[in-house]
Image (cartoon, grey):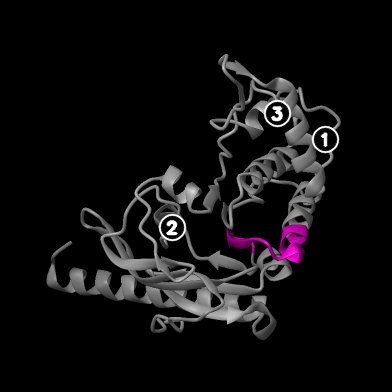
Amino acid sequence: MAPPVVPPTGAAEDILRVEHIAKRYGPITALRDVNLHLKKGEVLGLVGDNGSGKSTLMKTICGFQRADAGQMFLDGEPYEPRSVDQARALGVDAVYQDLALVDDLTVFHNMFLRRERVRRPLPFLSMGEMRRATRSALDEIGIHLPRLDAPVARLSGGQRQAIAVARTVFSDAEIILLDEPLAAMGVKEGAQILDLIDRLKSEGKLSIIIVAHNYAQVFEICDRVNLLDNGVIAFDKPTSETSVEELTGIVVDEYRRARAETAAQAGTRAQTGTE
């Protein structure tokens, strides 16, 4: 395996730096020594095989869990979120595959889930205000839905993903973590989400990390790509300086190497009679 890529520390343009992060679950090492950096306004693609530690890294960055070792920096300041809510308050939010949407609630109710606006002094929900704010937020990032009072269960996968992303943008996040945003989507719906990410990228207000398996989509929308392998960042290049073929070749070589090591270990056990 290639040695871990260590990004330069102290870069003024970095909004997020992750340095020497490690995480274990009992005997299982999920992250060994992760070094990652995200520039302001950048879209970073994070790829890797199943079990490579991508989800663990995302959960660590968004405050869902704490690392066993290492440190993180947000805008140059130490960043140690103790919860998802604290990370959100600091401008870091995540959108996962399950989207955390409530199917039976309307579009605007989902937009304000756990952030409901209430009339004062009486504890009544301000429905009109939430509808208007939802329409404004969706229009601002180019999402056009005819009805905001429809349950999200009636919407397409692309529309649901767009609402989840819009809710995160609307929360004033500066960094968005997108976990497989195009998973289980058709070509048309996937294109809608890519267009949305492209619009957000063009505005330069957000920095985004996208976890993905489809390399072609990564190269279409991302400025830079990181490969997480065996608990470390093993590859870090701007997408303009690499290709799908190069990245695929690295993964295939690692897969063949792992198979050869497994076969060699099995042969050794057979010879020593330990099987």
Q: Considering the numbered disc 2 on the image, is that residue within a helix, a strand or a loop? A: helix
Which residue does the numbered mark 1 point to in the structure image? 145
Query: What residue do we see at 42% from left, 63% from top?
Result: 52
Query: What residue do we see at 64% from left, 30% from top?
Result: 110
Magenta region includes residue 254? no
Q: Quadrant of the N terminus?
A: bottom left
Q: Nearer the viewer, residue 103 or 261?
A: 103
Q: Considering the numbered disc 3 on the image, is that residue within a helix, a strand or a loop? A: helix
Would you identify the image quadrant in which residue 41 lies? bottom right
Residue density around tag 2, few if under 14, some if 14–19, many if 20 or more, within 10 Å: many
Residue 137, image x and y in percent? Answer: 75, 42
Disc on res. 130: 3
- Decide which of tag 2 and tag 1 comes sooner along the chain: 2
**Which residues fall within the magenta stretch?**
198-214
Residue type indicated by callout 2 = Ile
Residue type indicated by callout 3 = Met
Magenta region includes residue 208? yes
Residue type indicated by callout 1 = Leu
Would you identify the image quadrant in which residue 123 lies? top right
| Residue 108 shows in this picture | yes
Whether 190 is drawn above or below 4: the answer is above
Which residue does the numbered mark 2 point to in the structure image? 61
Would you identify the image quadrant in which residue 202 lies? bottom right
Q: Considering the numbered disc 1 on the image, is that residue within a helix, a strand or a loop? A: loop
- Decide which of tag 3 and tag 1 comes sooner along the chain: 3
Q: Quadrant of the C terminus?
A: bottom left
Residue 213, image x and y in percent? Answer: 59, 60
Q: Is residue 202 left or right of residue 53?
A: right
Residue density around tag 1, few if under 14, some if 14–19, many if 20 or more, within 10 Å: some
